[in-house]
Amino acid sequence: MAKSQNNNPEHTEGPVATAIEEQTAKLPSDIFLWAALGSMGVSLYFQYIKERDKSLFVGQWAAPFLLLGLYNKLVKLEGHD
């Protein structure tokens, strides 16, 4: 898939963002899905052993993992500037 031209050349990404996108695009997207499912499983285990605080802490990791997976997918499909 060809990368699209930057329609707004006044707003470009810096070298750090470009480097991060190049590295994260190498990761398979399903890693983030498995990480989210794993955090839900660990959270469920902590609930089972009555560690409520740990369960809530680890359970909240699922949403950021899924968001990172979405970001990863967008970088792969759209690329950067």
Image (spheres, grey):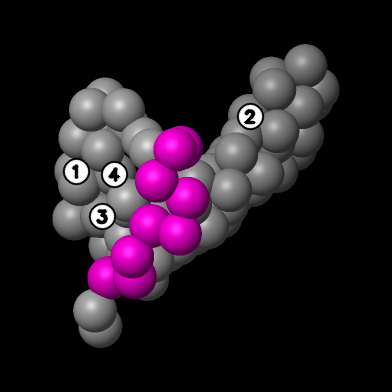
- 9 in magenta: yes
Kindly identify which residue carries mark 1: 23
**Amino acid type of the residue that numbered disc 2 sits on in the rendered structure:** Val
User: Mark 3 falls on what kind of element?
Assistant: loop
What's the CA distance linking mark 1 and mark 3?
5 Å
Q: Kindly identify the residue that appears in the image at 31 percent across and 28 percent down.
A: 14
Location of residue 59 with respect to 29 vertically, above or below = above
- 46 displayed left or right of 78: right
Disc number at residue 32? none
Residue 34 found in image quarter: bottom left
What's the CA distance linking mark 4 and mark 3?
6 Å
Query: Which mark's residue is nearer the viewer, 4 or 2?
Result: 4
What's the CA distance linking mark 2 and mark 1?
26 Å
Kindly identify which residue carries mark 4: 21
Query: Which mark's residue is nearer the viewer, 2 or 1?
Result: 1
Q: Which residues are magenta?
A: 3-11
Q: Answer few, some or many: residues within 10 Å of disc 4's Cα (few below 14, many 20 plus, some between 14 and 19).
A: some
Asked whether the residues under the numbered discs 1 and 3 touch, taking CB atoms below 8 Å apart as contact, a structural biologist would say yes
- 30 displayed left or right of 71: left
- 3 displayed left or right of 31: left
Kindly identify which residue carries mark 2: 58
Task: List x then y, in percent, for residue 46.
Answer: 68, 31
Pointer 2 or 1: first along the chain: 1
Magenta stretch, main secondary structure, is loop
